[in-house]
Image (cartoon, helix red, strand yellow):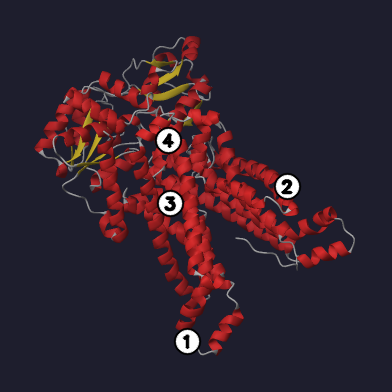
Amino acid sequence: MWMCAAMIDWQWIVDNQGPIAALLWQHTLLVAVSLFFGTALTGVLIGLTLRWPASAPVLLGLCGVLFTIPSLALFILLIPFTGLSLTTSVIGLTLYSLLILLRNVVAGIEKLPFDVLESARALGYTRWHRFVDVELHLIIPSLFAGLRIASVTLVGLVTVTALIGQGGLGQLLLSGFNQDFLTPIVVSVVLSLVLSFLFDSLIAHVGYWVTPWAR
Amino acid sequence: MKQSLWHSFNHRGFKLSLLAAGLFSLSFTTLAETVTIGGANFTESSILANIYASALKKNNIDVKTRLNLGNREIIIPALKSGEIDIVPEYLGALLNYYDGKTLATTQSDVSAGLEKVLPAEFTLLTPSSASSVTAWAVRAETAKKYGLTKLSDLTPVAHELVIGGPPEFPVRALGLPGLKRVYGLEFKEVKSLDMGGPLSRLALNSGKIDVATVVSTQGSLAKEDWVVLEDDKHEQPSQNVVPLVRKAALTPKIDGILNQVSHKLDNTALVELNKQVDLQHKDPAAVAEQWVNANL
Amino acid sequence: MDILTATWHWLIQPDHWLSDTGILLRLREHLWYVLVSMVIASAIALPLGVALGYWRKGAFLVINLFNIGRAIPSLGLILLCIILFGFNDVPVFVALIALSVPPILTNTWVGIYHADRTLCDAATALGMTPIQSLWQLRIPLAMPLIFAGVRTALLQLIATAVVAAYAGLGGLGRFLIDGLGQRDIPQVISGSLVVTLLALACEGIFSLINNVLFQSQTAPAITES
């Protein structure tokens, strides 16, 4: 443990806290923005699935296939179209968050207790009302479970975007590696972990708070 | 020092927040008042980009840096689209990017060649005397074993050796094909690593490769036990450092400042700056600013 | 559209398949990384998961500790390990094993821990000792879940092993990195295509095995995705 501490150049960390903080912020924003758009798109696609239940397996299948495409390839392929701006990263990240969220929410929909939905119909709920009052409440736990997984995955994926000039904390990783300098690499890995943990906790807490009926 | 770097990063952070509100429309907007300087993903490029930035900033021009963008294949399209305005380039490499078949090697030939092939929207400012040539290094013991001091010494023994280079090494004219053409070198195996970076260093030192592709001015050459082989047949073209600028972003003021920088920059300075960043782990922006304050 | 034709042309050149840097060799390297990591990860996770599920203590701590492996960016872990352990295959294995232990461990533990109470009581009633109950009942009952964990781990490994190429090593990621460096988009697409097909093929095989082996399972298994 002490040997590890000795291998790290603490002075460098102190000297560079400005840039490190900025990269951490960039990393956080990339994840948050992509999750936001991912959730919005998931909402749209879920609307489609509920309206046309037959589309669910097709969508899921497509998501499954897209998920096997290596993330680096996706980012590289986007570059000619969207350039080097943050747009490339956000588009790629949004797509990945969509894949994870969709899978979770669809699984949640499939688990919707049929008898509850039947009772809702019996009580006279319209389709739209049933969605808002009943289904949404039952789907939310799945959504939040998916958000937790997606956030941790995205923190890792943002690091990959360092290979195309972005990447938040991934930049520390690459420059440290280029200079054979252990400290920025360790800082990058530790901060990524902390960030994953924070996102996971935050979403778990928000999910708990938002679903009082599930306690 | 840290202030300038913090400022440029803060700029990025602010832009990111705007992005959340108007993603697609913002992504293709170029901020006309701010000059964006790009850099490739190696130390020297970061240093040079930061030197340009510091010099311009010292003269009250608003700058932003975008470093570690990747290689030329990513940077040139970004320059074309206006995402970056200036990037430090190397004469020979740039010519080969546009004209893969060129055989020009002297500075005047290369400059002439560039004038013909450079796209109309770009322009090159005055080249510096500082030059970073691609070179090849072997371990000291390998040099001793085969009596190697220059590249033509490799010709009889190349088939026993493994060579490492960046991913584009086997296909770019200035890479393996050039070595084969001028020196007749046929290696046992070619490994895809990086340009003199940590992968090459680790591979060369551990014996995984015998010859590594390096940059003549890189910092690690000062401390490694390697022999850099001389390019006796001048296969490699001149690689003077030169700012590549988007004509739309160029003003006479920028022209003057950057030409002054190129004039003051030389090989000794470049090697020294590289050493400070690579071996002493100093921040490229800090090192650049120090040099600008001392020399301009 | 001509990107697709260019990719097609890239793929039909036999040299791109058969040479020293061809698809078949890279596929072999890729599978080497994936399978070795899989075996070692299973060797760690399976016994550990069974032990934790059986003794019902310490699971929270251990599982969360291993979940760190899932949360660390693989690229970061590989580069860190290269600096620490040198330029060889070890960093790749460390990163891949760290990634694949959590799903197998979690699923194994859940399977053993949450074994159907009624069946366990029945086993005790029949006179089985706890160990016998473990081997003869709970482990077989947990098999679908364990299998799902292994399946998840395998697919993650196939996708993540491409990162070995950034560290200068082999595997299918080589086509991505080299394609990026050489401005050869057909190479990038071909490489990702092979990875995708490999993943889909494995998914298909596992589906088949799942249906064959576990079709007759009537005990409800808790599905973990």
Q: Quadrant of residue A117?
A: bottom right
- For label 4, the SS is helix
Residue marked by disc 1: A126
Circle 4 is placed at which residue position? A184
Q: Position of residue B38 (x, y in %)?
A: 27, 39
Q: Nearer the viewer, mark 3 or mark 4?
A: 4
Q: Secondary structure at mark 1?
A: loop
| Subunit of label 1 | A
Name the residue nearer the viewer: B73 or C37: C37
In the image, are marks 3 and 4 on the same chain?
yes
- Type of the residue with mark 4: Pro
What is the quadrant of the C terminus of chain C in the image? bottom right
The residue carrying mark 2 is: C47
Asked if marks 1 and 4 touch (Cβ < 8 Å), the reply is no
Q: Let me know if residue A70 appears in the view.
A: no
B186 is higher (above) or lower (below) than C182: above
- The numbered dot on residue A74 is 3
